[in-house]
Each structure stands twice: as C-alpha cells, then as structure tokens.
Image: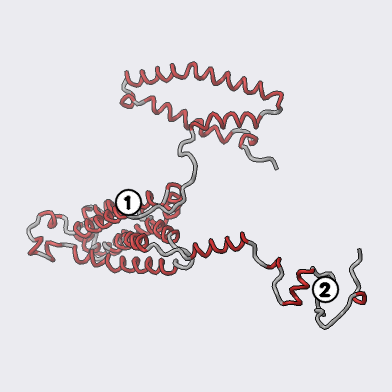
Amino acid sequence: MPPPRIEDREINEREPLLAPLTENTEVQDALITGSKPIASIPDHDQREGGNEEDDEDDTPLPLGQILSLCYIRLVEPIAFFSIFAFLNQMLWEIGDIGQGETGFYSGLIESLFSITEMMLMVHWSRASDRFGRKPIMITSLLGISVATGVFGFGRKIWQLVVFRCVAGLFAGTIVTVRTMISENSTKKTQARAFSYFSVAGNMGILIGPLIGGALSEPAKQYPSIFGGVKFFEEFPFALPTICTGIFSLSSALVATILIKETLGKKVYQKFGVSMAFTCGQLALNDIAPSSQTLGTLNSIALAVTSGTRAFVPALFTVIFAYGVTHQILWGYFIWVFEVLVAVGLVIAVPFLPKEAYGRGKK
C-alpha cells in the first residue's frame, strides 16, 4: 500500500510540520505531546545492569587490605636503598679492590637489583596470574628477606653480586601489590587507593637509607650498647641488612594472615591425568577417516592399551628392583625412567593430527 500523500491528510494547527508522513504512531504522539516514545524508555534489563554497575562503583575501599598492601609495598624500596649508605665503606674494607674501583663496583652492585628485577618482572606477573596473587607475593617476600638479610655477611665481591642478584630476583612484590590494589578498588576509589601506594613507595625510599646509615657499624656508632660485641665487630654491616630481612619477613607474615586472594578462582582440576583416557577417546573419534573405520580404529587402540597393561607393571618392577639392588641414584632410578616416559608423552602430543585438537570446523 503506498504511503498517504500530504494533500490526502487533514492538516490542523497541532500537526507537526517536520514529522515524516510514515512516522510511527508512537513517535508522532510523542512529538505532539512532548513525551518520550516507548521505544526510547530503557527496559528492565538495562536499568538493572546500570544499577549493578552503580553498586559496583559504590563499593567502599577496603582500607585494611590497602594499608596491608602498602606495608608490603615498603619492602622493595627499603631493600633497594638500604645499602646505599654503607656500600662504599663495605667495599673498601673488604680489600679486594683498589680505591679507584670502589665507585664502579658500588654502582654495579646497586644496579644489579633493578636489572634483575626488570628482567623477571613479567615472569612474576604471569606467575601471579597462574598461581594466584597471594602465594607469589609470599614467595617473593620470603626470598627477598633471605637475600637482603645475608648481604651484610659478604666477604667477597662475588658474594655481594650474588646476594644482590638474588634480592632482585625475588623483588617482584611491587607488581603483585600494584595489581592487588587495582583489584581491591573501583573506578571511584582507585585514585585514593593509589595515593596510598605512592605514599608507601616514597616512605620506603626515605626509610631505606636511614636504616643503612643509622645501623651500620654499630660497635663504632653505639659503643655503649654494641661495644665489645664480637659479632658486630666482625660483621659491621650485618645489622642493617638483618633488620631489612626481618622487615621483609614481617611483611610475608602480614601477607599470610591479612591479605585476601583477589584472583578469581577458576573451576578446573589442577591435575588432568584422569582426563587422559577421555581425551584419547575423543582424539580417536576426531581422527577417524569415517564412521565405518571408527570401530577398527578403536579396536587397535584397545589392543595396544591391553598389551601395554600386560607388560608395563612387570617391566617397572624389574627396573625398580635393579635400581635398588645396584643402588643406582640411591635406589631411585625408577623415577628417572618414569619422568623420561612422561616427558616423551608430553613431547608426542603436539605431533597429533590437527583433527585431534577438538576445534570446531570452520
């Protein structure tokens, strides 16, 4: 049916002059009365989704979690800057280098922390995505507590280099802390949360050199307290590094007790050995050339499986007995054999036909 012509319509003073002739009745009524058309009114699902987003944005900042994370945030700058106050003196007293080389080795050792940290930062981040924020944070805190704690006991340049590199190796807490602060805040509260994060970082930069300068050579600085203590006379730079290690250890304790995991739990099994039989059957189904050959293919697979089950227990028993009798690897030779078999199976999986990957056909 053709649209009505304008001359066929009755025009009056209430007729909208710019309204299309084919306009929907609801839209025409809206233009005349000034109301909103029904189509423009958001439906219930849209309103509900908007309310959920507003509720999420209105979530209060978990101040306890943020402050605990800020306490942990102090570890990295304190561990980095605490040696600055005494490192030159420490290198000079070690006596392995000349006076002109002190500055070079001092800069090298100070930089190794950041270089190692930079190289492994991404790996710590991926590990926290895979295994969880909290376990990775605790692991890194324990590692940095040991590495910084023993730094003051170094007697050789290479020992200081190793201790500093190990400390940088475990200095991935800053990535995890930053991520957890983001996950504990919303769009409305993240500015406030990261202001605490920045304050904690600056406090660590301030506290680190103070610890190193105030506690180094305690037998000379505080003879009334530490004078005559042979330990501090033999290791004059051990006290500040021990205190730094204890602080890192306390941060690990805080992370263990107070910090809550923020990475969403995924619903999957940690071990998929039990799925190997199902996956094998699915792979056979996918690679079968036709439905007529599927039975033959399954019979071959079952025959191979039955034969393997027949001789493998006896084979492994013989290998185990041989390893124990001759004390090969203290009797644990069987485990080497099993690991090699498992690795071989893992290597073989990528060589399966592409049809066995279970992807939908395009």
- Residue type (three-letter) at the residue carrying disc 1: Thr
Cα–Cα gap, marks 2 and 1: 68 Å
Q: Is residue 334 above or below residue 140?
A: above
Quadrant where the C terminus is found in the figure: top right
163 to 1, vertically: above or below: above
Q: Position of residue 80 (x, y in %)?
A: 31, 61
- Residue 97 visible in the current orientation: yes
Q: Quadrant of residue 40?
A: bottom right
Report whether residue 107 is seen: no
Of the residues under marks 2 and 1, which one precedes in the sequence? 2
- Residue occupying the point 46% across, 36% down: 271
Give the residue displayed 31% in from the left and 65% down from the top. Answer: 204
In depth, the one of 109 and 39 nearer the eye is 39
Per the image, the residue denoted by label 1 is: 256
The spot of residue 180 in percent (x, y) is 42, 58
Q: Residues within 10 Å of mark 1 (few under 14, many from 20)?
A: some
Q: Total marks drawn?
A: 2
- For the residue pair 300 and 321, the one nearer the viewer reads as 300
Q: Position of residue 132 (x, y in %)?
A: 42, 49
Mark in front: 2 vs 1 = 2
Q: Is residue 195 left or right of residue 159?
A: right
- Which residue is located at x 59 percent, y 63 percent? 47
Residue at the disc numbered 2: 20
Question: Could you tell me if the residues under marks 2 and 1 are in contact, i.e. CB atoms within 8 Å?
Answer: no
Q: Secondary structure at mark 1?
A: helix
Of residue 244 and residue 199, the one placed in the foreground of this image is 199
Residue type marked 2? Pro
Kindly identify which numbered label has been placed on residue 25: none
Q: How is the image coloured?
A: secondary structure
Q: Secondary structure at mark 2?
A: loop
Q: Answer above or below: position of 249 versus 23.
A: above
